[in-house]
Amino acid sequence: MTIRSAPEIWEAALGQLQIEVSKANFHTWLSKTRGLSFQDGKFTVGVPNTFIAEYLGKNQLSLIEKALTDVAREPVKIEFCVASDSETSVARRTKLPLFNPRYTFDTFVVGNSNNLAYAAAAKVVENPGLAFNPLFLHGGAGLGKTHLLHAIGNKALANHLAVLYVTAEQYTNELVTSIREKTTDEFRKKFRSVDILLVDDVQFFAGKEQTEENFFYTFNELHSNNRQIVLASDQAPKAIPMLRERLRSRLEWGLVADLQSPDFETRLGILQHKAKRDGVDIGPDVLEFIALQIKENIRALEGSLNRVVAYSKLLRTMVTPEIAARALEDIAGKEPQLAPITPNLITETVAGTFQLTLSDLRGKRRDEATVFARQLCMYLLRQETDCSLSEIGKVLGDRSPSTVSYAYEKMSGAINNDPLLKRQVFNIQQRIHATRSHN
Ligand code: ADP
Ligand code: MG
C-alpha cells in the first residue's frame, strides 16, 4: 500500500468526480474543497461553508465515498468540515504525515532475523537524536523496513514529536518541484524543522547528484541539531553503487541494522499473528504448511495466507493443508530459485567487461590490462564459487594454486585500499548476480 497524504488522495478523487458529475455541479459544490486529514478510515473534507457541507452530505455522499474508496483502496467514512480558505490552503501546503495504522511495533513479529532492527527502531523513538543517529535499516524487499519506519512514525506522533516520512523518490520530486516553483525555502524548512525524519528506499538517491547533494545538507543540518534521521534501503550503504563517498560515510555514522529473511518460527509467528488479527479460523497445521512453502518474503507470506483463505471461502470448505496446497499450487516452492554461479559465468563477465576473449584470459598474454583482468577473475572465482585454488588455476589455463593464491591476496589488498576499485569490482559482481537470476 502506498501512503499518500490526504490532500493528494482528495485531488485524485476529485479527478474522478469531475468525470462523473456535470461541469456546473462540480464547479458549484466540489471545486473549492480540500482533503484535510485521513486517519483510521475517516476522511475529512474541508469545505468553504455549511451550506456546501449539507448539500454534499445529502446529495453526493455515496458518489464521493465511492471515489475516495477507489483511490484510497480501503473503506472510507467521510466527514465534512467547514474550513476557512487560509486553513485549507495551509493544509494543502504542509502535507501532513500519514502513517499506516497497521504498521506499529505491536504488530511487528520479532525473531532472530529482525530483532536488531526492531530494537534499534524502538530505541530511536524513545531517545530521538540521542541513541543512534542515523539509524540505517537495510534488507531485501518485503522484510519489514517500511513497517518499522511507520511504527516509528506512529509512536512519534503519539509522543507529540514532529515527524516526517518520505521516500527518496518523493524527496527528489518535491525538490525538483520546489526548484521549478521557486519555493526551495519552504522545502528546506519543511525537512529541517522536524524531530524525526524517516526516509524510505534511499537506494533511489544513488546516481542522482543534485538530490544527493541537497539531501546531504538536510542530513547535516538535522544531524548537527541532534534531530533523528532514520533511513531504509534494500542494500547496505556500502553496497549502493554510485552513492557518493561523502554521503555514504555519513550514512554509516550511526547504527546500521539489517533485516534478514525470517526463519521458520518467525514466519509461523507472523502467520499466526495475521490470522488472529483478521479473525480467520485456520488450523496450526495449515499455518505450518504455508510457513514451510514461502520462505523469502513476508509480503508473499501474507499474500499466501490471504489466498488460502479466499480459496476455502470460494469452495465453502474448511481450510486443510490439502486445500492450502491446491491454493498455492502455482506459487509454492516456486520462489525464484537462482541458478548457481558457474566459473564460466564469471570468466565471461570479466572478459566482457575488459573487452578480452576467454583465450586471452586463459593464455599467455602478460600486458598489464590482461594480467589485471586475469587476477580479478581469480579473485572473483574464489569469492563467488566453491572452487579450490587448483580448480581455479585450471579454469584459467592451468595456472598453479600458488599463482591463484597470490593473485587473490593481491587483489583483496588492492580492493580494500582503493574505493574506486572496490566499486568497480562491486559493479562486476552485481552484473554476475543479475545475469544469473535471469537463467
Ligand atoms: P519492505 O519495506 O522491507 O519491503 P514492508 O515493511 O512493506 O517491507 O513489509 C511487507 C509486509 O510484511 C507488510 O505488510 C508488513 O506489515 C509485513 N511484515 C514485515 N515484517 C513483519 C514482521 N516482522 N511482523 C509482521 N508483519 C511484517
Ligand atoms: Mg518498503
Image (spheres, helix red, strand yellow):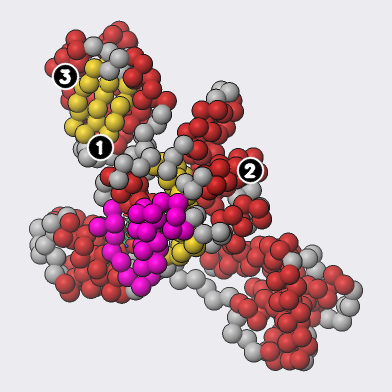
- Identified at 30% across, 18% down, the residue is 33
State the residue position of label 1. 39
Q: Please, what secondary structure does the residue beneath circle 2 have?
A: helix
Q: Position of residue 121 (x, y in %)?
A: 38, 58
User: Could you say which disc has been placed on residue 213 in the image?
Assistant: 2
Q: Which residue is mark 3?
A: 57
Please report the bounds of the magenta region as a residue range. Answer: 104-132
- Give the residue type that dot 3 points to: Gly
Label whose residue precedes the other's in the sequence (2 or 1): 1
Quarter where residue 31 is shown: top left
Label 2 lies in ligand 2 vicinity (Cβ under 8 Å) = no
> Front-most of 298 and 134?
134
Q: Classify mark 1: helix, strand or loop.
A: strand
Query: Looking at the picture, how far across and down is residue 292, in whole percent?
Result: 29, 74
Mark 3, Cα crowd under 10 Å, few <14 / some 14-19 / many 20+, is some
Q: Which amino acid is tagged 2?
A: Glu
